[in-house]
Image (spheres, rainbow, N blue to C red):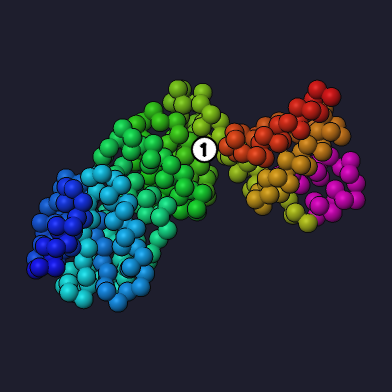
């Protein structure tokens, strides 16, 4: 009990972080989560990764400034709760909101993923919508870049629940669906977008990625197309198809270079297909992406040469 009191005394203002027990679980977690999400960190003194995760969680919770709380539970001292939640390895982290578990993860995560986990909780609970939505958008984008498309989609959807006119969240949700292979769902969202969103850069980015995703489904064999272009540099269709196949394989730089070369050789081929495809690739990337900046400069120099 003395250790518990000492832990509480050291907690940040507002009693955001505390050591818990089975006796206080109802008050510290279930009841407290009726107001804000409560993160429960299941740890043990002998657990190496716990020593890394615990301080990182505490720092992130403190940074959230009251939007979430945290309770630390030693599994050796609280085996009943650990058993009820089927904790099989530690560290394990549960998030509770309105008395129920709403999210969880196992293992020590990097700081960016911890922040994303907390930002998603804040958004899902409708907390701190003013500055929190921007942070949640950043977190969702980070999830998408790291391959956590499901979490990204959930976060983008939660942001739209708070701000239905958020073009960034709308476009992000479309891109998350594409990352999950839900092309039809992404296209339905794109077609059903509100008019005010259809005029935004975020919408154009999502549309370009959808177009490229459809093209990727029909991309030819990369090796065969490379051989065809190597055998005849003026085989424009093969070079165009090669650019599509390269982009589908994740080589946007190679795709851009081949499309630029096709434009240099015959800018009017197939009603200017090379230029049109270049703009689609550019639109699918971030405007400040070095590939976009370099590609646009090279294209402009050819156009105005």
Height in image: 265 above or below 239?
above
Mark 1 lies on a secondary structure that is helix
Query: Which residue is painted at 82% across and 37% down in the image?
Result: 262
Q: From the image, tell me which residue sits under label 1.
A: 187
Height in image: 23 above or below 151?
below
Q: Is residue 285 left or right of residue 40?
A: right
| Residue 83 point in image, percent of width and height | 21, 72
Asked whether residue 141 appears in the rendered view, the answer is yes
Height in image: 84 above or below 16?
below
Q: Main secondary structure of the magenta part?
A: helix
Q: Is residue 22 left or right of residue 146?
A: left
Most foreground residue, 235 or 145:
145
Query: Which residue is painted at 82% across and 38% down in the image?
Result: 261
The stretch of residues the image draws in magenta is 224-244
Residue 239 belongs to the span the image colors magenta: yes
Residue 56 belongs to the span the image colors magenta: no
| Residue 224 point in image, percent of width and height | 80, 55
């Amino acid at each position: 009990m003395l250790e518990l009191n000492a832990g509480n005394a050291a907690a940040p203002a507002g009693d955001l972080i505390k050591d818990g027990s089975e006796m206080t679980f109802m008050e510290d977690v279930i009841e407290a989560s009726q107001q804000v999400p409560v993160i429960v960190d299941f740890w043990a003194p002998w657990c190496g990764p716990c020593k890394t995760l615990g301080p990182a969680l505490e720092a992130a919770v403190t940074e959230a400034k009251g939007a979430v709380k945290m309770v630390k539970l030693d599994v050796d001292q609280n085996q009943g709760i650990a058993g009820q939640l089927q904790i099989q390895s530690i560290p394990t982290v549960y998030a509770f909101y309105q008395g129920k578990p709403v999210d969880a993860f196992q293992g020590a995560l990097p700081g960016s993923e911890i922040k994303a986990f907390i930002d998603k909780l804040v958004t899902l609970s409708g907390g701190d919508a003013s500055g929190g939505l921007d942070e949640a958008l950043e977190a969702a984008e980070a999830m998408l870049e790291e391959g956590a498309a499901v979490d990204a989609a959930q976060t983008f959807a939660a942001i739209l629940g708070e701000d239905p006119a958020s073009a960034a969240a709308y476009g992000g949700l479309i891109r998350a669906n594409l990352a999950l292979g839900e092309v039809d769902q992404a296209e339905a969202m794109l077609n059903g977008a509100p008019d005010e969103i259809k005029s935004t850069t975020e919408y154009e980015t999502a549309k370009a990625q959808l177009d490229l995703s459809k093209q990727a489904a029909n991309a030819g064999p990369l090796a065969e197309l490379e051989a065809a272009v190597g055998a005849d540099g003026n085989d424009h269709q093969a070079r165009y198809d090669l650019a599509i196949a390269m982009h589908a394989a994740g080589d946007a730089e190679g795709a851009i270079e081949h499309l630029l070369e096709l434009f240099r050789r015959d800018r009017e081929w197939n009603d200017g297909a090379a230029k049109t495809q270049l703009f689609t690739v550019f639109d699918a990337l971030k405007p400040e992406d070095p590939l976009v900046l370099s590609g646009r400069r090279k294209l402009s120099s050819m156009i105005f040469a």
